[in-house]
Amino acid sequence: MDEKVTRVGVVVTFLRMDARPADPAPPLPPNAAIHIERPCSVARYRQLYDTVGADYVWWLRRTVPDDQLAELLADQAVSVHVLTLDGADAGFFELDRGHSPWSQPGWVNLSYFGLMPHAVGRHLGAAFLRAAVDAAWQGSTTAVTVNTCTADHPRALPGYLRAGFRKTREVPEQWNVPDRLGLRIPEALKL
C-alpha cells in the first residue's frame, strides 16, 4: 500500500563560512544558557526537533527509525546544544563533524538550528546563531556549512548571511512529506 504524502516544493540554499568571525559575538541575555545535551536520548531529540521544526516542515528526522537516530546521536562527531531561558528550553542546534555528504575534512555542518515558537521574536537569533558558529569553529575546523530552504523562517537566510556565511548554491527540491506526520504545510509550498 502506498503511503499518502503531500508534495512540497522548496528551494534549498547551501551556505559556507570559510573563516572564523573576527567581530565580537553579540551577548545572549543573562537569563540564557547553552549546554551540550550528551548523551541526547531519542525522546529528548525528537522533542527538541519536533517543537522547533513544527512550523517549518522539518520532516526528515521524524521518519528516521529510533535505532538509527540513537546511533547518530551516540556518535561523538554529532553534538546537540540546547538553549534555555530561565531554565526552560528555548531552542537547539546540532553540529556534525563528519557525516554530511558534501563535507570535506575539517568542515563542520550546522545540521539543525532554530528557536522554539515562544522564543521567536525575542531578539535571540543573532546571538544564538553566533554561539553555534563559535562552537563549530572550536578545534581544527576549516569551514562551517549550513543549509536553509524556503520552508524555514523567512529570517533564516538573511540571518545566515549577516553571520558571515556565503551562498554556494541553490537547488530546487520536491519533497514527498508523509501525511502521517501531521505537519502543517503552508499552501504556498504545496505542489
Image (cartoon, rainbow, N blue to C red):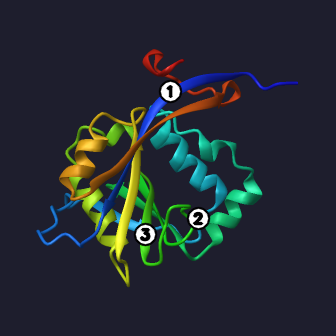
Residue 115 visible at all: no
**Helix, strand or loop under label 1:** strand
Question: Tags 3 and 1 in contact by the CB under 8 Å rule?
Answer: no
Which residue: 30% across, 65% down? 133
Furthest residue in direction left, as rendered: 23
- The mark nearer the N terminus, 3 or 1, is 1
Q: Compare residues 130 and 17 and report the one nearer the observer.
A: 17
Dot 3: what SS?
strand
Residue identified by numbered label 1: 9
Tell me: 29 left or right of 89: left
At x 62%, y 65%, the residue is: 73
Percent coordinates x, y for residue 125 in the rendering: 26, 49
Residue identified by numbered label 3: 108
For badge 2, the amino acid type reads Cys
Amino acid at pointer 3: Val
Q: CA distance from mark 2 to mark 3?
A: 19 Å
